[in-house]
Image (cartoon, rainbow, N blue to C red):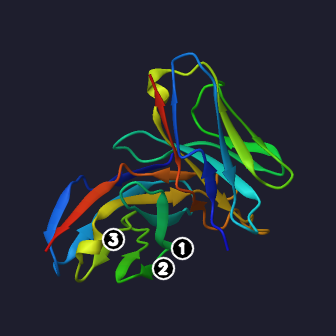
Amino acid sequence: DAGVTQSPTHLIKTRGQQVTLRCSPKSGHDTVSWYQQALGQGPQFIFQYYEEEERQRGNFPDRFSGHQFPNYSSELNVNALLLGDSALYLCASSPRKRARGLETQYFGPGTRLLVL
Amino acid sequence: GDSVTQMEGPVTLSEEAFLTINCTYTATGYPSLFWYVQYPGEGLQLLLKATKADDKGSNKGFEATYRKETTSFHLEKGSVQVSDSAVYFCALEGNFGNEKLTFGTGTRLTIIP
């Protein structure tokens, strides 16, 4: 059973460019969340997708956008890249509990983005 | 808003020493609490969790008890190994409708032989 997969593993971009990161959730999971982890920090919640809609969003600007596909995979898009966007971007998936919120979130290995 | 405060690192211990990493939280309602571990160059792995007060999560010799009265979820292990060297993150997840994970800043643990 494959876990959460992310692509690419590493990426180098320059300021002002746009980037798309991809995530495939664990089998049986239908909810995907994205997190940004700056060097030496804990992950920060970006947003969460369920049923192809953004359900919850953290304190990130509109330059960060996402999408979820019918097969539950997801993309994170970042426009107008800034140096401060350099970080490890983590995707997490979970099955949605029917009665009370989410099950445990399982994380992928991340995509390390460097903005020059 | 929700927040998690972790014991600052780095922490360096000798093999077979007792480990405690402190974690306290601030949240409304009844959050679920987690410890995640991150090995060098890897993503986060769930270590253990507790979903209600007085629950004890345990895994691989690690334990943590959900203490609502002290809003704490301290991580303990009786005898650490070199392979336990990693960064440990305490996190909480809010109730239905607020299901994001809020993480602490992480504690880097190094075990020396």
Mark 2 / mark 3, whichever is N-terminal:
2
Residue at the image point whose x is 37% and y is 44% from the top: A41
Which kind of residue does numbered mark 2 sit on? Answer: Asp
What's the distance in space between the residues labelled 1 and 3, CA to CA?
A: 16 Å
Q: Answer whether labels 1 and 3 touch (C-beta < 8 Å).
A: no
Q: SS of the residue at dot 1?
A: loop
Which residue in the protein does label 2 denote?
B55
Q: Is residue A109 above or below residue A116?
A: below
Q: Are marks 1 and 2 in contact (CB under 8 Å)?
A: yes
Callouts 2 and 3 on one subunit: yes
Labelled pair 2, 3 in contact (Cβ < 8 Å): no
Q: Are labels 1 and 3 assigned to the same chain?
A: yes
**Residue that carries the numbered disc 1 in the rendered image:** B52
Task: Residue type at mark 1: give it.
Answer: Lys
Question: Quick one: quadrant of the C terminus of chain B?
Answer: bottom left
Amino acid type of the residue that numbered disc 3 sits on in the rendered structure: Leu
Residue A23 placement (x, y as % from top left): 67, 50
Residue A107 located left or right of residue A87: right
Q: Chain of mark 2?
A: B
- In which quarter of the view is residue B89 placed? bottom left
